[in-house]
Image: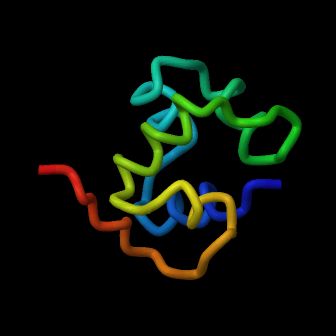
Amino acid sequence: MYKRIRELREDHDLTQKQIGEMLNMSQTGYNQYEIGKNDIPTKILIKLADFYNTSIDYLLERTDILEPYKSNKK
């Protein structure tokens, strides 16, 4: 289960339908990610991390630091 994407969605007072629409997918499709039935594709992880202003590592529980990484790009 991807509990962080559910927690972030709920913390932002959003529904699965709203997030699904933002990702151009159905509520049912998005729900499959939250319950861990389907793995989340990389492009969806990137969109979610950008939307919530966090890192993919945070979404995948590889870190507890909510802030996104700083880019070294110039």
44 or 71, nearer to the observer: 71
**Looking at the image, residue 20 lies above or below residue 53:** above
Q: Residue at x 28, y 66 (%)?
A: 70
Residue pushed farthest bottom?
64
Please tell me which residue lies in front, 35 or 18: 35
- Residue shown at 69%/36% (left/top)? 40
* Front one among 58 and 8: 58
- Quarter of the N terminus within the rendering: bottom right
Residue 33 at what x, y percent from top left? 73, 39
Where 63 falls versus 41 (above or below)? below
Query: Relative to 47, is 62 on the left or the right?
Result: right
Query: Which residue is painted at 43% across and 60% down in the image?
Result: 13
Tell me where residue 65 appears, x and y as whole percent. Answer: 49, 80
How far across and how far down the image is residue 5, in percent? 60, 55
Residue at x 82% of width, y 47% of height: 35
Is residue 29 shown above or below 64? above
Vertical position of residue 27 compared to residue 7: above or below: above
Q: Position of residue 74 (x, y in %)?
A: 11, 50
Report the number of numbered marks. 0
Q: Is residue 56 left or right of residue 21?
A: right
Residue occupying the far left of the picture: 74
Which of the two residues, 16 or 22, is positioned nearer the viewer here? 22
Looking at the image, what colour scheme do you see? rainbow
Horizontal relation, residue 27 to residue 70: left or right: right
Left or right: 8 in relation to 63: left
